[in-house]
Image: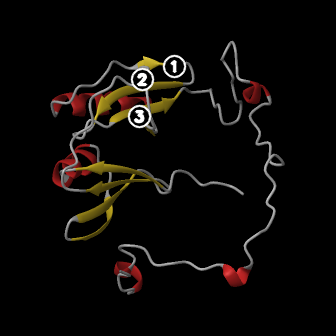
Amino acid sequence: MKFNGVNHLAMATGDMDKTILFWRDLLGMRLVAGLGQPGYRHYFFEISPYDLLAFFEWKGVEPMVKKEHGSPVKGRFGFDHVSFGVEEEEDLWELKDKLEAAGFWVSKVIDHGFIHSIYSYDPNNIPIEFSHNVSGTDIRKNPFMGDKQPTKLAIEGSEPQINKNPVKRATPIGERIVYPGVGSELFHGYKNVE
């Protein structure tokens, strides 16, 4: 099995117009799909030819509480920030200037050894990072473990340990059913199932 990127990251907003202004108009990500019905929207922005960023819009969603990227938290937690890659180092500086000109806080350019990054927040206070790979350094080709006390499983290396969870029964072709989802009627003519 091979993955081809991030199909989409799903976020939430209470104000789709502010979200469109930021992601499409300020950052330049094309709005490529919009699903919806009264009380529900699900819009998709193109990050790259393979990656999308999606937002649900629901009434009552408030911006997140701002949290510094990577700072420790306590209790239940599932999301810290999302990083978007840029092609050129110059793109980081252009993004920094655009974000500042639009009144958004943006960090200094930070050197992480294998990437240079800037950090900011969207109008929903979703913590975002933009990263450029350092020239000559490719952790996909040459994985690097810099943890001085790596976990037991991390010591096993970068390659998947595929025999740890063998499939006991593969789904037979005759049992493989794909059900229509909300919004699929826009593309396939299905009726909403209630």
Query: Label 1: few (<14), some or many (≥20) within 10 Å?
Result: few
What number is the disc on residue 73?
2
Q: Amino acid at mark 3?
A: His
Tell me which amino acid carries mark 2: Val
Residue 137 position within the rendered picture, expressed as x and y whole percent measured from the top left? 62, 27
Q: Quadrant of residue 36?
A: bottom left
Q: Earlier in the sequence, mark 1 or mark 3?
A: 3
Residue 63, percent from left and from top: 23, 39
Label placed on residue 112: 1
Q: Read off the residue under disc 3.
A: 81
Asked whether, in this view, residue 173 is left or right of residue 32, the answer is: right
**What secondary structure is marked by label 2?**
loop
Q: Amino acid at mark 1?
A: His
165 horizontally vs 120: left or right: right
Judge whether 135 appears above or below 78 on screen.
above
Which-is-in-front pick, marks 1 and 3? Answer: 3
